[in-house]
Image: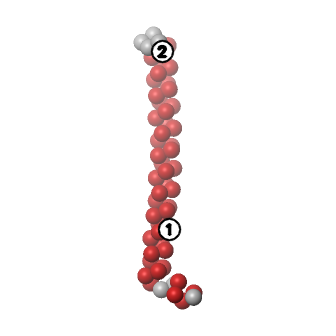
Amino acid sequence: MIGSLLTGTTLLAALTVLAGIVVVIMAVKFAVKMAIRVGVVAAVVLASLYAVGVIG
């Protein structure tokens, strides 16, 4: 059983799946960080526009 798991094609497929999962995790982390930064910037801009009297 171990020998069949370590054949070239199966091992390559498993490594490809693992690499894909890592890429997805990294992309989600990056997207969350960017969303938080954009949200903070938008909040600051809206607060400053409100304080100046442009909106509200």
Q: Which mark is residue 31?
A: none
| Image position, residue 7 (x, y; %) | 48, 86
Q: Which of 37 and 4 is in front in this view?
A: 4
Q: Residue furthest front?
A: 1
Determine whether label 1 and label 2 are within 8 Å by CB. Answer: no
- Expressed as whole percent of the image width and height from the top left, the position of residue 14 reads 49, 74
Residue labelled with disc 2: 50
Residue 25 seen in render: yes
Residue under the image location 45 percent in, 23 percent down = 45
Residue 7 vertical placement versus 16 (above, below) = below
Residue lying at 50% horizontally and 13% vertically, measured from the top left: 51
When asked about the image quadrant of residue 55, the answer is top left
Q: In this view, does 44 lie above or below 35?
A: above
Q: In the picture, residue 3 is in which quadrant?
A: bottom right
The structure residue drawn at horizontal position 47% and vertical position 21%, both measured from the top left corner, is 46
Q: How crowded is mark 1: few (under 14 residues within 10 Å), some or many (20 or more)?
A: few
Q: What's the residue type where badge 1 is placed? A: Leu
Question: Where the N terminus falls, by quadrant?
Answer: bottom right
Residue 52 can be seen in this image: no
Residue 39, horizontal then vertical, whole percent: 49, 33
Compared to residue 39, the image places residue 56 above or below, namely above
Give percent across and percent down for residue 20.
45, 64
Helix, strand or loop status at disc 2: helix
Q: Earlier in the sequence, mark 1 or mark 2?
A: 1
Q: Of helix, strand and loop, which one carries label 1? A: helix
- Three-letter amino acid code at the position of disc 2: Tyr
Decide: few, some or many residues near mark 2? Use Cα within 10 Å; few <14, some 14-19, many ≥20.
few
The residue labelled by disc 1 is: 18
Mark 1–mark 2 Cα distance, whole angstroms, equals 48 Å
Marks counted in the figure total: 2
Residue at 50%, 20% (x, y): give it.
47
Q: Image height check: is 55 above or below 26?
A: above
